[in-house]
Amino acid sequence: MLSTSIEIVPAEGPAMTRRFLAVPDAVYADDINWRPQLSFERAAHLNPAKNPGAAGLENRQLFLAVQDGHDVGRIAAFINPAHNAHYSANDGFFGFFDCLPQAALGKALLEAAESWLRERGAEKMIGPAQWSVNEECGLLIDGFDTPPVVMMPHGKPPYQAMIEEQGLKKATDMLAFQAELAAGYPRPKMTQAMVKSADRNKDIVIRPMRPSKFMDDVHIVMDVFNDAWSENWGFVPFNDKQIVHMAKEIKPIMFKEGLWVGEYKGEAIAYIWMIPDLNEAIRDLNGSILPFGWAKLLWRLKVAGVKQARIPLMGLRKEYHKTRTGLSIVAKLCETVFEAARQKGFTHCELSWILEDNPGMISICEQASATAYKTYRMYEKKL
């Protein structure tokens, strides 16, 4: 498409929102690694009545880029009160950034978001994120040759230059590690020693999720998460409504052997949570489960299975970081969930995301014979 006049328009109302949601499928139509998302799930993600992560965002604006009568890009600008309260800041965010690979399009979209935030008094623009760092976030800058796994973003190589040419600077990089579940054995001696230490310690209990007490276990692991991640870049704690929503979203696709809790002297201090890669299961459904896509989806998730999994959540209470007890429990959790995954027929697992300046978690991934294969970048700019 020749570069002609570009119009940036607010996407308001049901019809415009549907157009906003349709942009990625048009932008990535020629990308063999794109996985069309389920339309109803993406619509719910934008809806404050259905997604607590969007509910508190009274200041938000969706934008469409229109060129020659076609929707060729999109972006969102928003202010997250929970983030600003947590950091005593006056920040704004951009996200949902997708467009055809034209520098002028990226410039126009980013300028629209920046202008909107500046008009509302934001002193910094951060992104890309989809409402917060607890949901999809980061710009893919390395690893375009493989599909994104569930709840991880995709992108195009030109986006990096588009964003950086607008004066946004790197805030941090986040890594995704890929593990081949049958590889890397025997484990390094350190890993073996930590697992044996956990096995010998009678104060350590590694237990699976309790199906009859699912929500109790969810609240337990999220309490550990809010403590374990509290010093990470961009961290904002999950509130109760977000925890319940997250659990309801994950429960239909999870398997009970994917969630394990590590207890020490009767207290939950660590956990690991693995889920199937929904993106693999929906790869050819074109964003819809009607009329018969739902049957394929259920068959793949519950019967035929998928081969790729993801660990989106793992944590260890801060007081046990760098302790033998903590390291032993984490090693045992990793080996336990990997074995459970192999028994379920999974062959690969992504561990994501991991901050580049978190050597402890990077070491855990490497001890599990996982390798970094994708990099996502968060940007910021003073306004």
Image (cartoon, grey):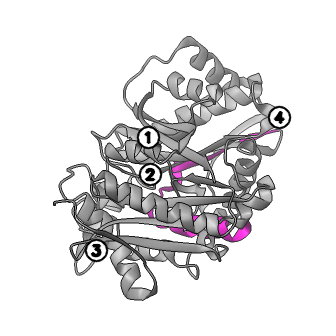
Q: Give the range drawn in magenta.
A: 239-264
Query: In the structure shown, which secondary structural element does the residue marked by tag 3 occupy?
Result: loop
Q: In which quarter of the image is residue 104?
A: bottom left
Please state which of residues 43 and 219 is positioned toward the viewer in this rendering: 43
Q: Are marks 1 and 2 in contact (CB under 8 Å)?
A: yes
Q: Which residue is under mark 4? A: 319
Q: Residue at x 21, y 51 (%)?
A: 31
Mark 1 and mark 4 lie on one chain; the one further toward the N terminus is 4
In the picture, measured across the screen, residue 239 lies left or right of residue 373, that is: right
Dominant SS type (magenta): helix
Is residue 130 among what the camera can see? no
The residues bearing labels 1 and 3 have C-alpha atoms spaced at a distance of 25 Å
| Mark 1 crowd level (few <14, some 14–19, many ≥20, 10 Å Cα) | many
Q: Say which amino acid is labelled 2.
A: Met
- Residue 372 appears in which quarter of the rendering? top left
Tell us which disc is closer to us: 1 or 2: 2
